[in-house]
Image (cartoon, rainbow, N blue to C red):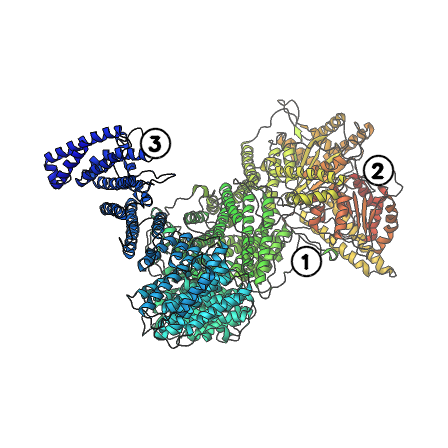
Amino acid sequence: MLDVNASLQTLSSVAQSGWKANSEEGRIKSSALSKVSAAVSRANEALSCLRVLCPDDLDIERAASSMMNKLLVLEMHDTTLPFLGHMHARLLALLGEPDPKTSAYCTSTSGSPVHLLSLPLPMLHSPEDAVLLTLISTYLMHAIISFTHIAMSSSSSTIVTADSFSTALAESGTLLTWVPYCVSLPRKHIDTTLTRAYTMLTKLCSSMAANSRSTFLIRLYALKCLLCTSPGTVQPNTFWDQIQKTCTVYVRSSFPISEVEELSVTTFVSESLGEVVQIAQSKPSFVEGRSFVLLCEMWTGFAKRSNDLRTLDRITDLMGPGSSSCSLAEVDSLANNLSKLDISAPSPKDKDTVVLECTRALAVLTKVAACLDANSDGTDDLSRRVHEAAKVLPGLGGLLCLPTEPNDELHRAQGKLQRTLEKLRRACIKVLDGEAKVQSHVIISLLMAISNAMEGAFKQNPSKDILTASLDSLFALARIRLKCNDPDTYTPTLDLLNDAVVLLNSTPDHVNAIPASARANYVRCISGAYHNLAGKLYQSSKFGGAVRFLKEGCSLGARALHIRAGVMQDDTEDGEWDEGWKQLEEQMFRRWELLAVCYSKMGDRKLAFDAFVESVKAFPYGSSDLEHLARSATSTNAFSANASTKQLGGIIDRLTYAATCELFLPTSEVSLHTALKPGVVSDEVVGLLLERQILTLEPCLRKDGVQTIVRGLLRDALSVYKATVLPLRRARVLLKCMELLWKDGNNNGGETSWTAERLGEEVLNLLNVEDLGHDSAFVAFRLQYTVAVHLWLSLFAYHSAGSPMTSTVSYHIEEAYNILRGLIPNSSTETDPKTKRSPAHAKKSPKETVPAKKPTRAASVRTTNKARVQNPVTPRPRKALENVSNVIQRTPPKQAGVTIGVQKAVIVFDLETIVGQLQMNFHLLGLLGLVLLKIKLLEALKRICERQLAVSADLYIIICVDLASEYVKLGKTKRANSIFSRSSAVMKSSDVSDEVRINYLLRYAEILALGNNILGSASFYCEAMGLSEASPPEDKALPTAERIKLRVGRLEHAAMACRVSAAIHYSRNNVVGALECTLQSLRLWNRAVDTLSRLSQSSSKPSKATDDSNPFEATPPESSSASNGRYNDHPRSLGQKRLMDGMEWRMVEGLLSTLLTLTHAYFTRGSSREAEYFAQQTQDLAESINAPTMVARALMRKGEIQLYQRQLGAGRGSLAKAAELLQDLPGVDAADMRRLNGDWNRLNEQAQDARDLYEEASAMLGELEGMLASFDGSRRKSSLTLLPQAALATAGQGAIVPTLLSDILRRHIWLLRDDGDDTIKDLIERLMALPASQDTKGEEHALMGKLTLHSVYDQFRSDMFLSSLAESTIALPMGMTSDRAVSLTPSTQDILSTLDHAEQLFLADLALTVDRGNVPHVREATTNLALIKALQTSLGKGGKDGPIIAAHLLDTSSAITLRREMLEAIQHKFPSVQFDDLEWPLMTPSGSPLPRKKPSNFLRLRTSSTEEASDDDVDSNASMKAYWDSIRETHAEQTSGTSLLSTTPKSQFPPHWTVVHISLTPDKSTLFISRQNVSSEPLIFCVPLKGRRESDEDEHLTFDDAVKELAEIIRLSDQGTRNAVNVRNDDPQARAAWWAERNTLDKRMQELLENIEFCWLGAFKTILSPVPPISAELITDLRTRLEKVFKRILPPQDKKQKQHPRLSDVLLDCFSSLSPKCREEELEDLLFFILDLYSFHGIPVAIADIDVDQVIVDLRCALEEHAALRNKRGKVNSTSVNDSHMFLVLDHNVQGVPWESIPVLRGQSVSRIPSVSFLLDRVRLASPKNRSGGVVDRISVDPRKTFFVLNPSGDLKGTEGRFKSWLEQMRSVGWEGVIGRPPSEQQFLDALARKDLVVYFGHGGGEQYVRSHKIRHLPRCAATMLWGCSSGSLKEMGEFDRVGTPFNYMLAGCPLLVANLWDVTDRDIDKFSQAVFDSLRLTPTRGGEQGTSVVTAIAQAREVCKLKYLTGAAPVVYGIPFYL
């Protein structure tokens, strides 16, 4: 202990010397430091020993404490740590704690020894020893001091950090926590200890960062130490100021931080303050006073930020009543105190009271606000707090309006209260506006209380701030109170807003407080509140409720603007106010519009109209730039310049439409000229608004009364636009007048000055004035208006239909063209495609102030019609006002400029505005035949588009498509391809509408198909179809007119698609598919015209063609209701009207084009009646629309048909009418007219006139070519590379209309065939240089073949040996054989070579045209080939297959039209699914057709129909469908050119069937007769009809003579038949005369038939004899006898030749049937025929040396002897079939001759067939029905399945009487039928389809009861007997194939048809038919065995007639022999 004391003394002496370790002196004086260090070391050792020796001695620790105190005085803080550590261990032991193993200081090398700052508190018993407590308190103080200094030392910062120090102080066991245990110690000791700790800690904090949490904790710990001292040590206010300062410094220094960190800081501070206040509450005097109140206010803020409600309650408790624990009475006391405060003149004490009460009230309000911010779910707690606040709020009004000094404490408290109240108000609004609606009614009540308090304060002391808050509260309450789906909330909400108005109006005496400018602003805000709530209701479709708010909002808005206008000069608002007022001005018209829309939704149209008018009045014309736009822009551009003008345009649209079409108001009320006050709006703007109204009503002009309104609006506009001031705008309105006049059908509505001429004249005068007045900005439109007026005048010239119509139209179009041409820069350099810019980057013209106008008429530019709904522009904050307007705006869609090349000049000309007129004029020029003018105009427009920057791509593409189409019509396909290829670049790079794109693709595809580029065409077609399928469906919300136009557009595209498909089919040689697609196109055009007619005011009913001229329809009266969808192909009759709309022009032009296409298609197919029908329909339609050129074209087509029909008079008349219509109009039509006139002259054998006309036509086309070359760009070289996939197949398209020119040249060349000069060579060269299509190339081959064949005949005539060949009969085969080859002369070899060349030419022709060339051409080519075969055979080069080939060629030349019609008819025999024509034909990208998609209900319909049908019917239909499918394939193969030289024998026929062809050559000079039989070799005779017999005594019967005689006999017979009704039975003289005439005619008929056989056939008639089997012995016998006859007259046999040439077996077989009793002339025929054969085989024949008479006698004897031998030997090899049958295949020239009744065929079984292919078809059809077991010609018909029609007209009583009883008997065996009444069409058709036999006794062939096409489309047809007059007649059609009822039955598959060739009397034909029935044993009791065939029965019945030829020759049979 002595060492310790000594050390203490040493330290004391050093301390007294002033030495300190941390001072400079201490660091220098090392002796003192050494002394101190030695003393410390010695004391430390001594204390260690003492602790060992006396562990429980407190004095040792007291000594250690004194040692530490000395060291702290010497500032040796680091040295104290060992002492602290040892002493800490000993104190732990003294306190009874476990003794640690080692001291913390010694073992803690890496950690901080801050644990030395605390000692554990006693757990059970607190220590009572004062010494120990003193030691503990002193130790803890020394530890704080030591560690404080260590923390302040930078060298020791690693040992003790601020964070570890602050953390250690917060632990239990530090000095503050031991203070309560030291209460027994003297207060001075405690105060000293705490004060020293406070001082040291405060000193430490001053050196630390203020924003550190450790600094704040240490500072707070120090203050807590100060708080624990004795009372009086520190004053409360000072203490609380220090606390507030500490918190404020820490919080402020912590910013800026994130929201989360901020919340953490405030929460931490609030909790720390709670700890301090908790300690302070032990001293009552500390928790009161001003400083504590300020601290509570600060603490409240921290607690509110952290939403700590408990802390807020605690703070309120500390501040007095009002806490959560206080009673309602205390709250009432606070409220009562607030109400009793005297605030009028408060004393200082009263001010303190006021401040205190304010603070207490502030606490209450803060609690509520915090509760709201915390979104507390405690319902009861929130309600209680709100209830407390509600009690306090009424008393706050006085506090809020209390006058205070700026720096006064009361002023501060008042501001604090105002801010708190504002925060609470906003918190309420925030909660109510949020998603969570917890206790909304409670919060609403609180907000109401706040609002009431503020209203009270405002009424006591008006203030802008309080008024603003009050109004905002009312707005919020109104917004929250309103429930759109609860109408009961509308009135309370309205009352709240009305309260706002009342509150604002309640301060009339406080103008200074609320100035007028502020008042105006408040009115504006209230107006906005009304409007916003109205918008909310509008969005919820509560239009009635919205109206109540809108009315107030609109009126207040107008009031606000009025107030502001009065104070604008005296008051200046800031920028924000200016923006608000600007927004209100711009919004007012939209508010009125919203009100109008709501009225409209409610159905109150009148109030809606009034509101719309107010909207127009309220529009800000100045700020919207409309005033400026009115002076420089057009109506369309002005109303599309910005959003406001667009919306104004929509408002005008709605009010104008409503007033006109819904309210039917007069013009004065509709016109805005009346509504707008003079002087308020300028005349320019008024005129602009009126123009907009006019534009609005344009789509509605067809409605009643609209035109009257528009006329009145135009008058108002003209009154505004004075001629002297605004001439150009007046001209613009006058153009609108012309447009109205046009749409009104030139009806001026009583305005005498409104005529097209006067209006046009005034416009031209106005455009020519020099002084433009105020219209100088519109000078750029002068040219545009000039073009427009000329275009209108052109259209009106058409409308007037005057005589100079064409010339007037041409004049005005030329004027317009000259202006347009002047707009094109004179540039010799073409645009370089390399510099081409994409239209997407095209810049607008610098002179354009507004976007270019987009056409508003849907019919003007074919663009996609998409209705766009524009919403009125509304202020951003007002979301409720979005999507207000339902007005359909005319906003121009996005436009793409078309830039084709480098721009040389900028052209200011808006083509878009006149595009509708341009298109109508395009169509007009086409209809008038002004093709060159049309092309010229299109070329100019195209070049303008290529040089103008802002032209829409749609317009450019439309012009290019139209121009290319016109070039194609003129044959300029190369130029057209260039245009399409160039425009395709624009298609790819520009924004082209789908409608225009589809049109482009289809037109291009059609042109490519016409050029045989099938792949390219199909590719474009498929692309167009994809676009069409992707088009959006029809919008049901669109107006009716728009929907109709969209529907018409779809029909138009479908019709165009069908035309393209037809062209592709035609290029693929699928003529049937092409025709079907064209008919579908026609139906679609008709539907389009019919649909479009719904827009017309006076739509005429379509006239349905039911006359005889319609070959598709012969509707009987009883069955007129039966419809046939397919053949509803006649065009809609438009009546006598003029086309008005551009879409009408397009539809009618498409319809006319399709009709002409069908005319040509049927003409080419050979269906002349159908062609003539469509030509007549074209004429009717063209006449109805006043299109003289189209009428002329139709007449020319009709005239051409009539010329082919050999109706030369009618043809001449049609051509004369066409020429009169064409007048002197140059062009293609004029050249075609001359061609047709040349044809007429040629047919009338006026060759020279024909040549002249052909030459004129050719010259006209040449001139036309020169004119076209001057402006079509053909002389300019284009560097544009054509697209490879779009290149046309044809090349060298240099000539104009090459097809027409080819026709002209061919005709001209043929007429010059005998000239042989250079002229014909030049013409041939021109012909060969023309671009060749498939058809024209084939016809060129045919022409060259005919010329070659003609040269052969010239060679014949020049050759002595061959000169008689043309007049000699030729046999195929030659008829004679020789043992050596016939030597040919050089001339003969040349002729054969020429014939071979001609044959190749005709074959090449047919290869191209056999399936689609016109019928006369194909027939002539095949006949010429047969003739060539005959000539080759006669010259020794026939070949063994020559007869077969020739016979096949003859068969091909027969019934060409019927074969083609068969392919079409098959398509309609099984119409299983009805497709909609609107569906495009499907095809692959390669052009192959695809089957159409079946409708969705197809399977259901098919199933139901199958269930109804029987199994037999289903099987029958399946077999019939398979049969017809095979027929279609067979016929398709036969139409190919490769089948023409077929050598396939007809092995399918029975051996007793013989097929005979009878044909005439084209010049009708030679008759071909061929015979084919399975059992013998084919044989053909080529018999000349003239020159065969040399005798001049015999009068030759020419073909024409025979035909005329036959026609005369039939005419007289028909006349006699008709006169029979006038012959009375009681007049025997008249009866005798009548019968004498009949007998005479019968005799003439007999003689004619005998003469035909004798004169035409002669000995060669034997080819028509039956072909019985004959033995070889008999053939040899005949040969021997004939050779013996000729041996006597021929020179001796050449020794080198073994034997004479021998007659062939086939020829001997034919002549073996020649009767020995034949006439001598016939034997002469045989004689000369055989002599010719010998002569050709090199045996010289001297005709002059031959005794012809003797030879004839010898020949007769030879025939007699041969006949005797044949009769003696009899027939050999006879079969069981005895009745042979012959089929006649007759050329159209000879079909009218009753060949069956010529002597050689009389009585034979003979029937007619169209061709061998039809016979094969009938055999194939009949084979499954053969009941005889394998013999195909023994086919039977079930006689029980018979249907009869007897006397359907009721006037054949005699016939009915003769057959009625028999037919009634036949009912017993199953016969059915009708007697004395007409059958229905369906009944007739069912009988034909289901029965085996149909017998008809009536007039004609029943055509009046069933339509022809219905019969053709039957899948099955019964054998039919038509006993009516001329039922089997085939009408003569000139060069066309004949037509008639028999062919309809053939197409239906009828196996056998009995019919009459001409009219017969009923009694005689009844006798004939009865004989037939008797031969067939048609009785109820007949057996089942087979009897006579129907054909044999017919042949036998001819003899039973009284008039065996006049009646007996009339019935003929078509088909194959059937047996009953």
Mark toward the start of the polypeptide (2 vs 3): 3
Q: Nearer the viewer, residue 656 or 50?
A: 50
- The disc placed on residue 1987 is 2
- 1793 in relation to 765, above or below: above
Q: How far is disc 2 from disc 3 in space, using C-alphas?
A: 146 Å
Other-residue count near label 2 (Cα within 10 Å), few / some / many at <14 / 14–19 / ≥20: some
Percent of width and height locating residue 203: 22, 46
Percent of width and height locating residue 892: 44, 59
Mark toward the start of the polypeptide (3 vs 1): 3
Mark 2: which secondary structure? Answer: loop
Q: Nearer the viewer, residue 1769 or 145?
A: 145
Q: Nearer the viewer, residue 1770 or 998?
A: 998
Mark 1: which secondary structure? Answer: loop
From the image, which quarter does the N terminus lie in? Answer: top left
Which residue is label 1 attached to? 1107
Percent of width and height locating residue 1715: 77, 36
* Labelled pair 2, 3 in contact (Cβ < 8 Å): no
Task: Name the amino acid, label 1.
Answer: Asp
Percent of width and height locating residue 62: 24, 37
**Quadrant assignment, res 287:** bottom left
From the image, which quarter does the C terminus lie in? Answer: top right
Q: Is residue 856 visible?
A: no
Task: Name the amino acid, label 3.
Answer: Pro
- 402 in relation to 952, above or below: below
Q: How far is disc 3 from disc 1 in space, using C-alphas?
A: 133 Å
Which residue is label 3 attached to? 98
Which residue corresponds to the image point at 78% horizontal and 44% vertical from the top-left? 1891
